[in-house]
Image (tube, grey):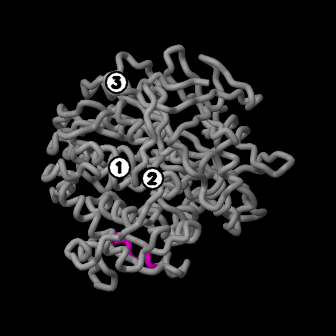
Amino acid sequence: MFQSEFAPIEPVELPIHEAVLGHAAQYGDTPALIDGTNGTTVTYRQLDLHHRRIAAGLAHAGLRQGDVLALHSPNTIAFPAAFFGATRAGASVTTVHPLSTAEEFAKQLRDSSARWIVTISPLLSVARRAAEMVGGIEEIFVCDRDPAEAHRSLLDMLASTDAPDPQITIDPAEDTAALPYSSGTTGVPKGVMLTHRSIATNLAQLYPFIPVGPGDRILAVLPFFHIYGLTALMNAPLRGGATVVVLPRFELDQFLAAVEKHRITGLYVAPPIVLALAKHPAVANYDLSSLDYIVSAAAPLDAQLAQACSRRLGLPPVLQAYGMTELSPGTHVVPVGARNPPPGAVGKLLPSTEMRILSLDDPTKELGVGEEGEVAVRGPQVMKGYLGRPDATAAMIDDEGWVHTGDIGRTDADGWLFVVDRVKELIKYKGFQVAPAELEALLLTHEAVADAAVIGVYDEDGNEVPKAYVVRQPSAQLTEDDVMAYVAQRVAPYKKVRRVEFVDGVPRAASGKILRRELRERERA
Protein backbone atom coordinates (compact mmCIF):
# COMPACT_ATOMS: atom_id res chain seq x y z
CA MET A 1 0.00 0.00 0.00
CA PHE A 2 1.25 3.46 -0.91
CA GLN A 3 0.39 6.38 1.38
CA SER A 4 0.69 10.13 0.91
CA GLU A 5 3.88 11.73 2.17
CA PHE A 6 1.88 14.83 3.10
CA ALA A 7 0.25 15.46 6.46
CA PRO A 8 -3.33 14.14 6.65
CA ILE A 9 -6.27 16.54 6.71
CA GLU A 10 -9.60 16.38 8.48
CA PRO A 11 -12.71 15.86 6.32
CA VAL A 12 -14.48 19.16 5.63
CA GLU A 13 -17.92 18.93 7.23
CA LEU A 14 -19.49 21.87 5.40
CA PRO A 15 -22.05 22.31 2.62
CA ILE A 16 -20.18 23.01 -0.59
CA HIS A 17 -21.54 26.58 -0.86
CA GLU A 18 -20.17 27.34 2.62
CA ALA A 19 -16.86 25.60 1.90
CA VAL A 20 -16.37 27.72 -1.23
CA LEU A 21 -18.12 31.01 -0.43
CA GLY A 22 -17.78 31.05 3.35
CA HIS A 23 -15.10 33.76 3.13
CA ALA A 24 -16.72 35.76 0.34
CA ALA A 25 -17.49 38.66 2.68
CA GLN A 26 -13.81 39.25 3.45
CA TYR A 27 -13.01 39.47 -0.28
CA GLY A 28 -15.78 42.06 -0.70
CA ASP A 29 -15.41 44.02 -3.94
CA THR A 30 -12.61 41.83 -5.32
CA PRO A 31 -13.68 40.54 -8.73
CA ALA A 32 -14.77 36.93 -8.39
CA LEU A 33 -15.87 36.39 -11.99
CA ILE A 34 -15.16 38.28 -15.21
CA ASP A 35 -16.89 37.51 -18.49
CA GLY A 36 -13.99 37.06 -20.90
CA THR A 37 -16.15 38.02 -23.88
CA ASN A 38 -17.57 41.36 -22.69
CA GLY A 39 -15.85 42.23 -19.41
CA THR A 40 -18.92 42.01 -17.15
CA THR A 41 -17.70 41.54 -13.59
CA VAL A 42 -19.24 39.92 -10.51
CA THR A 43 -17.59 40.72 -7.18
CA TYR A 44 -17.40 38.34 -4.24
CA ARG A 45 -19.97 40.44 -2.41
CA GLN A 46 -22.34 40.18 -5.37
CA LEU A 47 -21.76 36.44 -5.84
CA ASP A 48 -22.54 35.79 -2.20
CA LEU A 49 -25.75 37.85 -2.40
CA HIS A 50 -26.77 36.41 -5.79
CA HIS A 51 -26.51 32.77 -4.81
CA ARG A 52 -28.50 33.42 -1.64
CA ARG A 53 -31.29 35.17 -3.56
CA ILE A 54 -31.37 32.39 -6.15
CA ALA A 55 -31.66 29.86 -3.32
CA ALA A 56 -34.59 31.83 -1.90
CA GLY A 57 -36.20 32.15 -5.33
CA LEU A 58 -35.89 28.44 -6.07
CA ALA A 59 -37.32 27.52 -2.69
CA HIS A 60 -40.21 29.98 -3.22
CA ALA A 61 -40.87 28.32 -6.62
CA GLY A 62 -41.30 25.01 -4.84
CA LEU A 63 -37.87 23.37 -4.91
CA ARG A 64 -37.40 21.24 -1.81
CA GLN A 65 -34.46 19.61 -0.11
CA GLY A 66 -33.54 16.40 -1.93
CA ASP A 67 -34.80 17.58 -5.33
CA VAL A 68 -32.48 17.32 -8.34
CA LEU A 69 -31.89 20.38 -10.51
CA ALA A 70 -30.37 19.99 -13.99
CA LEU A 71 -27.92 22.80 -14.81
CA HIS A 72 -27.68 22.92 -18.61
CA SER A 73 -25.29 25.65 -19.62
CA PRO A 74 -21.89 26.47 -21.09
CA ASN A 75 -19.49 28.46 -18.93
CA THR A 76 -21.02 31.80 -17.95
CA ILE A 77 -20.57 34.11 -14.99
CA ALA A 78 -24.07 33.03 -13.88
CA PHE A 79 -23.15 29.34 -13.60
CA PRO A 80 -21.58 29.51 -10.10
CA ALA A 81 -24.51 31.48 -8.63
CA ALA A 82 -26.98 29.00 -10.12
CA PHE A 83 -24.99 26.03 -8.83
CA PHE A 84 -24.50 27.34 -5.29
CA GLY A 85 -28.03 28.76 -5.16
CA ALA A 86 -29.38 25.30 -5.90
CA THR A 87 -27.21 23.57 -3.31
CA ARG A 88 -28.10 26.20 -0.68
CA ALA A 89 -31.77 25.47 -1.38
CA GLY A 90 -31.05 21.79 -0.70
CA ALA A 91 -30.93 20.45 -4.26
CA SER A 92 -28.45 18.10 -5.86
CA VAL A 93 -27.15 19.58 -9.12
CA THR A 94 -26.78 17.32 -12.13
CA THR A 95 -24.62 19.12 -14.68
CA VAL A 96 -25.58 18.59 -18.32
CA HIS A 97 -23.38 18.95 -21.39
CA PRO A 98 -24.67 22.03 -23.27
CA LEU A 99 -24.24 20.21 -26.60
CA SER A 100 -26.37 17.25 -25.56
CA THR A 101 -29.17 16.36 -27.91
CA ALA A 102 -32.69 16.45 -26.52
CA GLU A 103 -32.64 12.64 -26.39
CA GLU A 104 -29.39 12.55 -24.40
CA PHE A 105 -30.65 15.29 -22.08
CA ALA A 106 -33.91 13.38 -21.54
CA LYS A 107 -31.99 10.23 -20.57
CA GLN A 108 -30.13 12.17 -17.89
CA LEU A 109 -33.30 13.86 -16.64
CA ARG A 110 -35.05 10.52 -16.40
CA ASP A 111 -32.17 8.70 -14.73
CA SER A 112 -31.49 11.47 -12.20
CA SER A 113 -35.20 12.11 -11.48
CA ALA A 114 -34.55 15.81 -12.00
CA ARG A 115 -37.58 18.04 -11.43
CA TRP A 116 -36.06 21.45 -12.28
CA ILE A 117 -33.98 22.78 -15.17
CA VAL A 118 -31.79 25.87 -15.38
CA THR A 119 -30.52 26.67 -18.88
CA ILE A 120 -29.75 29.64 -21.13
CA SER A 121 -32.11 31.07 -23.74
CA PRO A 122 -30.16 29.77 -26.81
CA LEU A 123 -30.57 26.21 -25.44
CA LEU A 124 -34.22 26.51 -24.46
CA SER A 125 -35.56 24.52 -27.40
CA VAL A 126 -33.41 21.51 -26.48
CA ALA A 127 -34.33 21.80 -22.81
CA ARG A 128 -38.04 22.03 -23.62
CA ARG A 129 -37.94 19.00 -25.92
CA ALA A 130 -36.09 16.98 -23.29
CA ALA A 131 -38.59 18.01 -20.62
CA GLU A 132 -41.50 17.02 -22.85
CA MET A 133 -39.98 13.58 -23.44
CA VAL A 134 -39.61 12.93 -19.73
CA GLY A 135 -42.54 14.70 -18.09
CA GLY A 136 -42.61 15.69 -14.44
CA ILE A 137 -40.42 18.79 -14.81
CA GLU A 138 -41.77 21.45 -12.47
CA GLU A 139 -40.21 24.46 -14.20
CA ILE A 140 -37.50 25.54 -16.62
CA PHE A 141 -35.59 28.69 -15.67
CA VAL A 142 -33.09 30.66 -17.75
CA CYS A 143 -29.93 32.34 -16.51
CA ASP A 144 -30.35 35.24 -18.93
CA ARG A 145 -33.60 36.42 -20.53
CA ASP A 146 -36.06 34.37 -22.54
CA PRO A 147 -36.87 36.49 -25.60
CA ALA A 148 -40.38 35.03 -25.65
CA GLU A 149 -40.77 35.64 -21.90
CA ALA A 150 -42.25 32.18 -21.49
CA HIS A 151 -39.73 31.18 -18.81
CA ARG A 152 -38.68 32.96 -15.65
CA SER A 153 -35.13 34.23 -15.33
CA LEU A 154 -32.74 33.90 -12.41
CA LEU A 155 -32.09 37.60 -12.96
CA ASP A 156 -35.53 38.31 -11.55
CA MET A 157 -34.61 36.41 -8.40
CA LEU A 158 -31.57 38.65 -7.95
CA ALA A 159 -33.81 41.69 -7.84
CA SER A 160 -36.30 40.18 -5.41
CA THR A 161 -36.03 40.58 -1.66
CA ASP A 162 -39.44 39.10 -0.85
CA ALA A 163 -38.64 35.39 -0.73
CA PRO A 164 -37.21 34.21 2.61
CA ASP A 165 -33.97 32.27 2.79
CA PRO A 166 -34.59 28.51 2.84
CA GLN A 167 -34.06 27.06 6.31
CA ILE A 168 -32.64 23.59 5.78
CA THR A 169 -30.04 21.39 7.45
CA ILE A 170 -27.54 19.68 5.16
CA ASP A 171 -25.67 16.54 6.20
CA PRO A 172 -22.35 17.01 4.34
CA ALA A 173 -21.41 13.34 4.64
CA GLU A 174 -24.69 11.99 3.25
CA ASP A 175 -26.34 14.63 1.08
CA THR A 176 -25.40 14.73 -2.60
CA ALA A 177 -24.22 18.13 -3.82
CA ALA A 178 -23.26 17.30 -7.40
CA LEU A 179 -24.50 14.55 -9.68
CA PRO A 180 -22.27 14.57 -12.77
CA TYR A 181 -22.56 11.67 -15.18
CA SER A 182 -19.65 9.34 -15.83
CA SER A 183 -19.26 6.03 -17.59
CA GLY A 184 -16.87 4.79 -14.91
CA THR A 185 -14.68 1.99 -16.23
CA THR A 186 -17.21 0.71 -18.78
CA GLY A 187 -20.77 1.06 -19.93
CA VAL A 188 -23.26 3.87 -20.29
CA PRO A 189 -23.16 7.11 -18.26
CA LYS A 190 -24.17 6.81 -14.62
CA GLY A 191 -24.98 9.47 -12.04
CA VAL A 192 -22.01 9.92 -9.67
CA MET A 193 -23.19 10.92 -6.20
CA LEU A 194 -20.62 13.39 -4.86
CA THR A 195 -21.45 14.57 -1.37
CA HIS A 196 -20.83 18.03 0.00
CA ARG A 197 -18.06 16.53 2.15
CA SER A 198 -16.30 14.63 -0.63
CA ILE A 199 -16.08 17.69 -2.89
CA ALA A 200 -15.16 20.12 -0.10
CA THR A 201 -12.55 17.76 1.30
CA ASN A 202 -10.97 17.27 -2.11
CA LEU A 203 -10.58 21.05 -2.38
CA ALA A 204 -8.72 21.05 0.93
CA GLN A 205 -6.56 18.14 -0.27
CA LEU A 206 -5.64 19.96 -3.49
CA TYR A 207 -4.82 23.33 -1.93
CA PRO A 208 -1.28 22.52 -0.65
CA PHE A 209 -0.29 21.34 -4.12
CA ILE A 210 -1.60 24.33 -6.08
CA PRO A 211 -2.42 27.15 -3.64
CA VAL A 212 -4.79 29.67 -5.22
CA GLY A 213 -5.54 32.97 -3.51
CA PRO A 214 -6.15 36.71 -3.87
CA GLY A 215 -4.24 38.19 -6.78
CA ASP A 216 -4.33 34.98 -8.79
CA ARG A 217 -6.22 35.05 -12.08
CA ILE A 218 -7.48 31.77 -13.50
CA LEU A 219 -8.86 31.36 -17.03
CA ALA A 220 -11.93 29.10 -17.10
CA VAL A 221 -12.23 27.67 -20.60
CA LEU A 222 -12.71 24.01 -19.69
CA PRO A 223 -16.39 23.40 -18.95
CA PHE A 224 -17.84 23.85 -15.47
CA PHE A 225 -20.25 20.98 -16.13
CA HIS A 226 -17.24 18.59 -16.17
CA ILE A 227 -15.90 17.69 -12.71
CA TYR A 228 -12.41 18.93 -13.66
CA GLY A 229 -13.72 22.38 -14.54
CA LEU A 230 -16.14 22.44 -11.62
CA THR A 231 -13.30 21.78 -9.16
CA ALA A 232 -10.24 23.44 -10.67
CA LEU A 233 -11.82 26.42 -12.43
CA MET A 234 -14.82 27.22 -10.23
CA ASN A 235 -14.67 25.83 -6.71
CA ALA A 236 -10.93 25.99 -5.99
CA PRO A 237 -10.27 29.59 -7.14
CA LEU A 238 -13.48 30.96 -5.61
CA ARG A 239 -12.65 29.20 -2.32
CA GLY A 240 -9.34 31.06 -2.21
CA GLY A 241 -10.40 34.56 -3.31
CA ALA A 242 -8.89 34.42 -6.82
CA THR A 243 -10.46 35.96 -9.92
CA VAL A 244 -11.93 33.63 -12.54
CA VAL A 245 -12.09 34.87 -16.15
CA VAL A 246 -14.83 32.88 -17.87
CA LEU A 247 -14.96 31.82 -21.53
CA PRO A 248 -17.85 29.80 -22.99
CA ARG A 249 -15.68 27.63 -25.24
CA PHE A 250 -12.13 27.18 -26.48
CA GLU A 251 -11.25 29.34 -29.48
CA LEU A 252 -7.48 29.78 -29.67
CA ASP A 253 -7.23 33.49 -30.46
CA GLN A 254 -9.92 34.41 -27.92
CA PHE A 255 -8.18 32.21 -25.35
CA LEU A 256 -4.76 33.77 -25.97
CA ALA A 257 -6.19 37.29 -26.00
CA ALA A 258 -7.84 36.66 -22.63
CA VAL A 259 -4.53 35.49 -21.13
CA GLU A 260 -2.87 38.67 -22.39
CA LYS A 261 -5.64 41.13 -21.47
CA HIS A 262 -6.45 39.79 -18.02
CA ARG A 263 -2.88 38.86 -17.08
CA ILE A 264 -3.82 35.28 -16.32
CA THR A 265 -1.49 33.60 -13.81
CA GLY A 266 -2.68 29.99 -13.95
CA LEU A 267 -4.06 27.76 -16.69
CA TYR A 268 -5.89 24.47 -16.19
CA VAL A 269 -6.18 22.73 -19.53
CA ALA A 270 -6.47 19.40 -21.33
CA PRO A 271 -3.79 17.99 -23.69
CA PRO A 272 -5.25 19.46 -26.93
CA ILE A 273 -4.69 22.97 -25.54
CA VAL A 274 -1.12 22.04 -24.53
CA LEU A 275 -0.63 20.94 -28.15
CA ALA A 276 -1.87 24.31 -29.43
CA LEU A 277 0.36 26.22 -27.02
CA ALA A 278 3.35 24.17 -28.09
CA LYS A 279 2.86 24.27 -31.86
CA HIS A 280 0.36 26.82 -33.15
CA PRO A 281 1.92 29.89 -34.81
CA ALA A 282 -0.75 32.23 -33.33
CA VAL A 283 0.80 31.84 -29.88
CA ALA A 284 3.69 34.07 -30.93
CA ASN A 285 1.29 36.99 -31.46
CA TYR A 286 0.34 37.31 -27.76
CA ASP A 287 2.04 38.29 -24.52
CA LEU A 288 1.67 35.30 -22.20
CA SER A 289 4.35 36.42 -19.75
CA SER A 290 1.87 36.69 -16.85
CA LEU A 291 1.58 32.89 -16.66
CA ASP A 292 3.14 31.22 -13.64
CA TYR A 293 2.07 27.63 -14.31
CA ILE A 294 0.01 25.32 -16.50
CA VAL A 295 -1.81 22.23 -15.25
CA SER A 296 -2.98 19.51 -17.64
CA ALA A 297 -5.44 16.78 -16.70
CA ALA A 298 -8.53 14.87 -17.96
CA ALA A 299 -6.52 12.76 -20.43
CA PRO A 300 -2.94 11.48 -20.82
CA LEU A 301 -0.33 14.07 -21.79
CA ASP A 302 2.70 13.08 -23.81
CA ALA A 303 5.90 13.98 -21.91
CA GLN A 304 7.65 15.39 -25.00
CA LEU A 305 4.65 17.57 -25.83
CA ALA A 306 4.62 18.90 -22.25
CA GLN A 307 8.30 19.77 -22.48
CA ALA A 308 7.83 21.49 -25.85
CA CYS A 309 5.06 23.66 -24.39
CA SER A 310 7.15 24.63 -21.36
CA ARG A 311 10.17 25.51 -23.47
CA ARG A 312 8.18 27.63 -25.88
CA LEU A 313 6.48 29.67 -23.14
CA GLY A 314 9.52 29.84 -20.88
CA LEU A 315 7.62 28.24 -18.01
CA PRO A 316 8.39 25.54 -15.44
CA PRO A 317 7.32 22.03 -16.51
CA VAL A 318 3.64 21.59 -17.32
CA LEU A 319 2.10 20.09 -14.20
CA GLN A 320 -0.12 17.03 -14.48
CA ALA A 321 -2.96 15.86 -12.26
CA TYR A 322 -4.83 12.58 -12.05
CA GLY A 323 -8.24 11.48 -10.86
CA MET A 324 -11.71 10.63 -12.05
CA THR A 325 -15.25 11.87 -11.56
CA GLU A 326 -15.85 9.15 -8.95
CA LEU A 327 -13.02 10.67 -6.86
CA SER A 328 -14.35 14.24 -6.69
CA PRO A 329 -12.02 14.18 -8.80
CA GLY A 330 -8.39 14.42 -7.62
CA THR A 331 -5.99 11.85 -6.17
CA HIS A 332 -2.59 12.89 -7.58
CA VAL A 333 -1.08 16.25 -8.54
CA VAL A 334 2.39 17.49 -9.41
CA PRO A 335 2.87 20.34 -6.90
CA VAL A 336 3.59 23.87 -8.05
CA GLY A 337 7.27 24.46 -7.47
CA ALA A 338 8.18 20.77 -7.58
CA ARG A 339 11.86 20.48 -8.38
CA ASN A 340 12.50 18.43 -11.50
CA PRO A 341 9.39 16.26 -11.50
CA PRO A 342 10.06 13.27 -13.76
CA PRO A 343 8.65 13.71 -17.27
CA GLY A 344 5.30 12.00 -17.68
CA ALA A 345 4.49 11.77 -13.98
CA VAL A 346 0.87 12.59 -13.14
CA GLY A 347 1.67 13.54 -9.56
CA LYS A 348 1.98 12.41 -5.97
CA LEU A 349 -0.77 11.19 -3.67
CA LEU A 350 -2.89 13.92 -2.11
CA PRO A 351 -3.10 14.09 1.70
CA SER A 352 -5.24 11.40 3.38
CA THR A 353 -5.20 9.32 0.17
CA GLU A 354 -3.97 5.74 -0.17
CA MET A 355 -3.15 3.72 -3.27
CA ARG A 356 -2.54 0.14 -4.28
CA ILE A 357 -1.13 -1.20 -7.53
CA LEU A 358 -2.91 -4.50 -8.21
CA SER A 359 -1.71 -7.34 -10.42
CA LEU A 360 -3.65 -7.65 -13.66
CA ASP A 361 -3.39 -11.42 -13.44
CA ASP A 362 -4.31 -11.69 -9.76
CA PRO A 363 -6.22 -8.62 -8.48
CA THR A 364 -5.70 -9.76 -4.87
CA LYS A 365 -1.93 -9.38 -5.26
CA GLU A 366 -0.36 -5.99 -4.47
CA LEU A 367 2.62 -4.89 -6.51
CA GLY A 368 5.57 -2.76 -5.50
CA VAL A 369 7.63 0.14 -6.79
CA GLY A 370 8.22 -0.01 -10.53
CA GLU A 371 5.67 -2.75 -11.20
CA GLU A 372 2.72 -2.08 -13.49
CA GLY A 373 -0.84 -2.92 -12.46
CA GLU A 374 -4.29 -1.48 -11.92
CA VAL A 375 -4.44 1.65 -9.79
CA ALA A 376 -6.78 1.41 -6.80
CA VAL A 377 -7.41 4.43 -4.56
CA ARG A 378 -9.02 5.04 -1.18
CA GLY A 379 -9.71 8.32 0.61
CA PRO A 380 -12.34 10.80 1.82
CA GLN A 381 -12.91 12.05 -1.74
CA VAL A 382 -14.47 8.77 -2.90
CA MET A 383 -18.02 9.10 -4.24
CA LYS A 384 -21.03 7.92 -2.30
CA GLY A 385 -21.87 5.62 -5.22
CA TYR A 386 -23.68 5.50 -8.55
CA LEU A 387 -27.26 6.72 -8.33
CA GLY A 388 -29.67 3.78 -8.39
CA ARG A 389 -26.97 1.31 -9.44
CA PRO A 390 -25.76 -0.69 -6.44
CA ASP A 391 -24.25 -3.40 -8.64
CA ALA A 392 -22.19 -0.88 -10.62
CA THR A 393 -21.11 0.76 -7.35
CA ALA A 394 -20.00 -2.58 -5.93
CA ALA A 395 -18.06 -3.31 -9.12
CA MET A 396 -16.22 0.00 -8.78
CA ILE A 397 -15.71 0.20 -4.98
CA ASP A 398 -14.77 -2.97 -3.09
CA ASP A 399 -15.78 -3.92 0.45
CA GLU A 400 -12.74 -2.12 1.90
CA GLY A 401 -13.53 1.16 0.14
CA TRP A 402 -10.96 0.86 -2.66
CA VAL A 403 -11.93 2.40 -5.99
CA HIS A 404 -10.69 0.26 -8.88
CA THR A 405 -9.88 2.92 -11.46
CA GLY A 406 -9.35 0.73 -14.53
CA ASP A 407 -6.08 2.56 -15.21
CA ILE A 408 -2.72 0.80 -15.35
CA GLY A 409 0.07 2.61 -13.53
CA ARG A 410 3.36 2.31 -11.72
CA THR A 411 5.19 4.35 -9.12
CA ASP A 412 8.86 5.17 -8.76
CA ALA A 413 10.89 5.13 -5.56
CA ASP A 414 10.03 8.79 -4.88
CA GLY A 415 6.27 8.23 -5.00
CA TRP A 416 5.54 9.66 -8.46
CA LEU A 417 2.70 7.94 -10.31
CA PHE A 418 2.90 7.18 -14.03
CA VAL A 419 -0.29 6.10 -15.83
CA VAL A 420 0.78 3.90 -18.69
CA ASP A 421 -2.40 2.37 -20.12
CA ARG A 422 -6.08 1.70 -19.42
CA VAL A 423 -7.83 -1.49 -18.50
CA LYS A 424 -11.11 0.20 -19.13
CA GLU A 425 -12.54 0.56 -22.58
CA LEU A 426 -13.65 4.16 -22.21
CA ILE A 427 -12.55 6.57 -24.93
CA LYS A 428 -11.42 10.04 -23.82
CA TYR A 429 -11.90 12.51 -26.64
CA LYS A 430 -10.28 15.81 -25.59
CA GLY A 431 -11.07 15.00 -21.96
CA PHE A 432 -14.73 14.07 -22.58
CA GLN A 433 -15.80 10.53 -21.92
CA VAL A 434 -17.23 8.47 -24.76
CA ALA A 435 -18.62 5.03 -23.98
CA PRO A 436 -18.07 2.56 -26.84
CA ALA A 437 -21.14 0.58 -25.78
CA GLU A 438 -23.36 3.63 -26.32
CA LEU A 439 -22.08 4.16 -29.86
CA GLU A 440 -22.28 0.45 -30.67
CA ALA A 441 -25.90 0.33 -29.56
CA LEU A 442 -26.66 3.34 -31.76
CA LEU A 443 -24.90 1.88 -34.80
CA LEU A 444 -26.92 -1.30 -34.51
CA THR A 445 -30.11 0.71 -35.00
CA HIS A 446 -29.04 1.43 -38.61
CA GLU A 447 -30.87 -0.93 -40.94
CA ALA A 448 -27.74 -1.50 -43.05
CA VAL A 449 -25.50 -2.42 -40.08
CA ALA A 450 -25.26 -6.09 -39.11
CA ASP A 451 -22.74 -5.68 -36.31
CA ALA A 452 -20.41 -3.02 -34.94
CA ALA A 453 -17.64 -2.41 -32.45
CA VAL A 454 -15.99 0.85 -31.36
CA ILE A 455 -12.54 1.51 -29.93
CA GLY A 456 -10.38 4.56 -29.38
CA VAL A 457 -7.60 5.27 -31.86
CA TYR A 458 -5.23 8.22 -32.07
CA ASP A 459 -5.35 10.85 -34.79
CA GLU A 460 -2.44 12.83 -36.17
CA ASP A 461 -2.65 15.35 -33.31
CA GLY A 462 -2.50 12.69 -30.62
CA ASN A 463 -6.19 12.90 -29.70
CA GLU A 464 -8.04 9.68 -28.93
CA VAL A 465 -11.04 9.44 -31.28
CA PRO A 466 -13.83 6.86 -31.71
CA LYS A 467 -13.35 4.42 -34.57
CA ALA A 468 -16.15 2.10 -35.64
CA TYR A 469 -15.64 -1.35 -37.11
CA VAL A 470 -18.81 -2.03 -39.04
CA VAL A 471 -20.23 -5.21 -40.58
CA ARG A 472 -22.64 -4.41 -43.42
CA GLN A 473 -25.89 -6.24 -43.93
CA PRO A 474 -25.74 -8.50 -47.02
CA SER A 475 -26.02 -6.43 -50.22
CA ALA A 476 -26.28 -3.17 -48.21
CA GLN A 477 -24.84 -0.03 -49.81
CA LEU A 478 -23.21 1.80 -46.90
CA THR A 479 -20.24 4.19 -46.99
CA GLU A 480 -17.95 5.56 -44.29
CA ASP A 481 -19.61 8.96 -44.67
CA ASP A 482 -23.05 7.36 -44.23
CA VAL A 483 -21.99 5.82 -40.93
CA MET A 484 -20.39 8.99 -39.56
CA ALA A 485 -23.37 11.13 -40.58
CA TYR A 486 -25.84 8.71 -38.99
CA VAL A 487 -24.06 8.91 -35.64
CA ALA A 488 -23.40 12.65 -35.84
CA GLN A 489 -27.12 13.38 -36.21
CA ARG A 490 -27.90 11.53 -32.99
CA VAL A 491 -25.17 12.37 -30.47
CA ALA A 492 -23.33 15.37 -29.06
CA PRO A 493 -20.39 16.48 -31.24
CA TYR A 494 -17.70 15.07 -28.95
CA LYS A 495 -19.20 11.57 -29.29
CA LYS A 496 -19.06 11.47 -33.09
CA VAL A 497 -17.46 8.50 -34.83
CA ARG A 498 -14.45 9.90 -36.67
CA ARG A 499 -13.03 6.79 -38.34
CA VAL A 500 -14.84 3.84 -39.96
CA GLU A 501 -13.56 0.52 -41.19
CA PHE A 502 -15.77 -2.13 -42.77
CA VAL A 503 -15.01 -5.67 -41.64
CA ASP A 504 -16.38 -9.15 -42.26
CA GLY A 505 -17.00 -9.81 -38.58
CA VAL A 506 -16.51 -8.37 -35.09
CA PRO A 507 -14.27 -10.51 -32.84
CA ARG A 508 -16.25 -11.78 -29.86
CA ALA A 509 -15.74 -14.13 -26.93
CA ALA A 510 -18.00 -17.14 -26.44
CA SER A 511 -20.04 -15.03 -24.03
CA GLY A 512 -20.69 -12.52 -26.83
CA LYS A 513 -18.43 -9.84 -25.36
CA ILE A 514 -16.59 -7.81 -27.99
CA LEU A 515 -12.86 -8.51 -27.92
CA ARG A 516 -11.71 -4.92 -28.26
CA ARG A 517 -8.19 -5.95 -27.37
CA GLU A 518 -7.97 -7.80 -30.70
CA LEU A 519 -9.19 -4.70 -32.53
CA ARG A 520 -6.60 -2.55 -30.77
CA GLU A 521 -3.87 -5.03 -31.72
CA ARG A 522 -5.12 -4.97 -35.31
CA GLU A 523 -5.04 -1.16 -35.27
CA ARG A 524 -1.46 -1.08 -33.98
CA ALA A 525 -0.42 -3.58 -36.66
| Labels 3 and 2: the sequence-earlier one | 2
Quadrant of the image occupied by residue 400: top right
The residue pinned by badge 2 equals 196
Type of amino acid under label 1: Ala
Q: Which residues are magenta?
A: 120-128
Q: Secondary structure at mark 1?
A: helix
Disc with the residue nearer the chain's start (2 vs 1): 1
Numbered disc in front, either 3 or 2: 2
Q: Which mark is residue 124?
A: none
Closest to the observer, 219 or 137: 137
Magenta stretch: dominant secondary structure: helix
Give residue 266's position: percent from left, percent from top: 27, 37
Q: Is residue 460 visible?
A: no
Residue at the spot of label 3:
317
Cα gap from disc 2 to disc 1, whole angstroms: 9 Å
* Residue 517 figure quarter: top right
**Which one is earlier in the sequence, the residue at label 1 or at label 3?**
1
Mark in the foreground, 1 or 3: 1
Q: Position of 277 compared to 328: left or right? A: left
Q: Amino acid at mark 2?
A: His
